[in-house]
Image (cartoon, coloured by chain):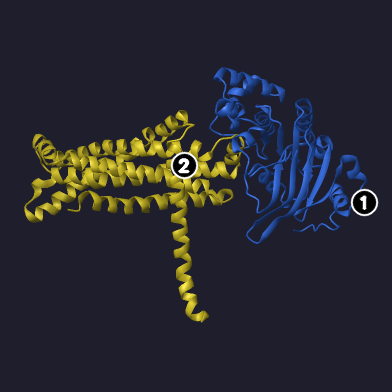
Chain colours: A yellow, B blue
């Protein structure tokens, strides 16, 4: 009997652990959202988080977007040449950037930069008893630490995505005009003509969802960090990996919702 | 008055508290002694609700702490953490005035700053320190800032978690004297956990020894030296042999 059940137990244990983790994260998310609409509010902490997550992420998101836009133009030109469809480069670069690559790569870069720093910061606060100190000072750590960060990321990442979209399209335009011989005016005209507002708006909604996920995972893993440097390191890794996987899964789900006809 | 009755707490298979019975009368300074890993910090955190106890009851002035209004309950407490637990991102005065800048005790910013500087002066720190960040201070100064934060809102009850750990003997003496003075002048109830016997003698009205998850002995400082209890005698004289295993 043991020989029969042991393999099942070996499969069941991690499955149950994963389900329990999902449940804990869902409850944490519900608590964060619940606290967003109940006072007290911490505007100073929110503005600080907005600066850290939004403004300071601009360089990395911008660099990612410009190189991605350029590479995308080269790829589409090369692939399109097989069907004599090189002219689609401007429109496909634009649609590809605003619908998919802008939000997904922007989200992943923010996950790498922000989820890690949030998890490390809050994890260090936990192991140095600063979170306990907050409680003894009558301050709810979720309200004081998690809510400003999650709210800031949810609002800042769509803006980063919009900026990244523009920079990515500009990267495609640079490569298209300077490397692939497109006329500048025609390239821009094609970009504008084939881009619909929903293409842009759907990407911004994705950005908001990814921002929420990034900050939520950083806060959750930071607050549940293990002891010592190793515990904080593990929390940081879990936050980045968790946020990245969730971003990709959520991207698929949102794409199904937004674009499956 | 804080009363603990049969308090138990288990982490996994480790039964840290096995039925703690203890009374801390109002206005008294109680020091809990015991070896490392005997659950002193856990006991303190159970009282504050930072860790939920598994069994038994903890009451403050007759009211169960688990059912009391949390904000009102915590407003009565101040706490000095072992490592200071100062908020790295805030300046020293903002740390000290943290409770005075939000919630029910909120004051105007300038008033909160003035109170913070006054409390810093009370613990022997110059006003210039107020605008520094905690990372710029020495360990002893961080402890004093932690002490200033603990007393900033003039709480009725103050907890001290290993207040002299990591300090040199002179700085430890300074902190001990400060704690004694402040507790006496504020008329506060104090609970200190330590294994530093110089702290015990400087701070305590009464002493309780926690060992093996229960209060092994309790009495005054004078009684502590005279008691024949082998656990207490081994601990206060730092003997390697006795009923307390040296290797735990």
Residue at image location 64% in from the left, 20% down from the top: B127
The image's mark for residue A241 is none
Horizontal and vertical percent position of residue B225: 91, 44
* Label 1: how many Cα within 10 Å (few below 14, some 14–19, many 20+): few
Q: Left or right: where does residue A6 sit relative to residue A135?
A: left
Q: Quadrant of the N terminus of chain B?
A: top right
- Gap between marks 2 and 1, in whole Å? 53 Å
- Please name the residue shown 18% across and 39% down the image: A197
Q: Residue furthest front?
A: B62
Question: Looking at the image, can residue B195 be seen?
Answer: no
Could you tell me which secondary element the residue under label 1 belongs to? loop
Q: Position of residue B142 (x, y in %)?
A: 65, 32
**In the rendered image, the vertical position of residue A42 relative to residue A61, given as above or below:** above
Where residue B235 appears, as percent x and y from the top left, is: 84, 50
Residue at which label 2 appears: A118
Can residue A197 be seen from the camera position used here?
yes
In this orientation, which residue lies closer to the viewer: B41 or A166? B41
> Is residue A4 found left or right of B40 in the rendered image?
left
Please tell me whether mark 2 sits on a helix, a strand or a loop.
helix
Mark 1 chain: B
Q: Nearer the viewer, residue A195 or A78?
A: A195
Provide the residue designation for mark 1: B228
* Left-right relation of A1 to B152: left
Instruction: Name the image quarter holding residue A201.
Output: top left
The chain under label 2 reads A
């Amino acid at each position: 009997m043991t020989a029969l059940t042991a393999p099942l137990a070996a499969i069941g244990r991690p499955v149950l652990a994963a389900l329990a983790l999902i449940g804990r994260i869902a409850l944490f998310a519900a608590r964060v959202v619940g606290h967003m609409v109940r006072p007290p509010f911490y505007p100073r902490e929110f503005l600080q988080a907005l600066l850290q997550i939004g403004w300071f992420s601009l360089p990395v998101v911008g660099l990612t977007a410009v190189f991605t836009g350029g590479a995308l133009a080269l790829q589409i030109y090369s692939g399109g040449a097989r069907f004599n469809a090189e002219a689609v480069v401007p429109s496909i670069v634009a649609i590809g950037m605003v619908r998919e690559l802008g939000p997904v790569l922007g989200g992943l870069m923010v996950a790498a930069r922000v989820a890690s720093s949030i998890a490390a910061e809050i994890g260090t606060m936990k192991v140095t008893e600063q979170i306990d100190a907050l409680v003894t000072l009558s301050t709810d750590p979720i309200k004081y630490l998690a809510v400003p960060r999650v709210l800031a990321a949810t609002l800042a990442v769509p803006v980063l995505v919009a900026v990244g979209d523009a920079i990515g399209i500009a990267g495609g335009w640079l490569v298209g005009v300077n490397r692939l011989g497109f006329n500048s005016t025609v390239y821009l005209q094609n970009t504008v003509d084939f881009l619909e507002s929903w293409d842009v708006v759907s990407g911004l909604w994705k950005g908001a969802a990814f921002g929420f996920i990034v900050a939520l995972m950083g806060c959750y893993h930071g607050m549940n960090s293990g002891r010592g440097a190793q515990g904080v390191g593990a929390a940081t890794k879990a936050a980045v990996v968790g946020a990245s996987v969730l971003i990709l899964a959520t991207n698929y789900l949102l794409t199904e919702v937004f674009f499956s006809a | 008055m804080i009363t603990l009755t049969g308090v138990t707490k288990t982490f996994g298979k480790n039964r840290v508290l096995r039925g703690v019975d203890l009374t801390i009368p109002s206005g008294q300074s109680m020091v809990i002694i015991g070896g490392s890993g005997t659950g002193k910090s856990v006991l303190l955190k159970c009282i504050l609700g930072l860790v939920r106890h598994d069994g038994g009851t903890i009451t403050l002035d007759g009211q169960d702490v688990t059912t009391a209004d949390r904000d009102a309950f915590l407003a009565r407490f101040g706490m000095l953490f072992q490592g200071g637990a100062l908020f790295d991102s805030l300046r020293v005065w903002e740390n000290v005035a943290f409770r005075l800048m939000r919630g029910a005790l909120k004051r105007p910013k300038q008033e909160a700053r003035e109170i913070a500087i006054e409390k810093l002066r009370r613990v022997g720190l110059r006003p210039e320190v107020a605008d520094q960040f905690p990372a710029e201070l020495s360990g002893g100064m961080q402890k004093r800032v932690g002490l200033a934060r603990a007393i900033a809102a003039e709480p009725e009850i103050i907890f001290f978690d290993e207040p002299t750990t990591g300090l040199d003997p002179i700085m430890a003496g300074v902190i001990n004297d400060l704690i004694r003075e402040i507790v006496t002048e504020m008329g506060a109830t104090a609970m200190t956990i330590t294994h530093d016997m110089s702290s015990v003698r400087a701070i305590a009205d009464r002493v309780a020894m926690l060992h093996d998850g229960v209060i092994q002995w309790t009495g005054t400082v004078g009684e502590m030296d005279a008691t024949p209890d082998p656990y207490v005698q081994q601990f206060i004289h730092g003997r390697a042999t006795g009923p307390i295993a040296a290797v735990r």
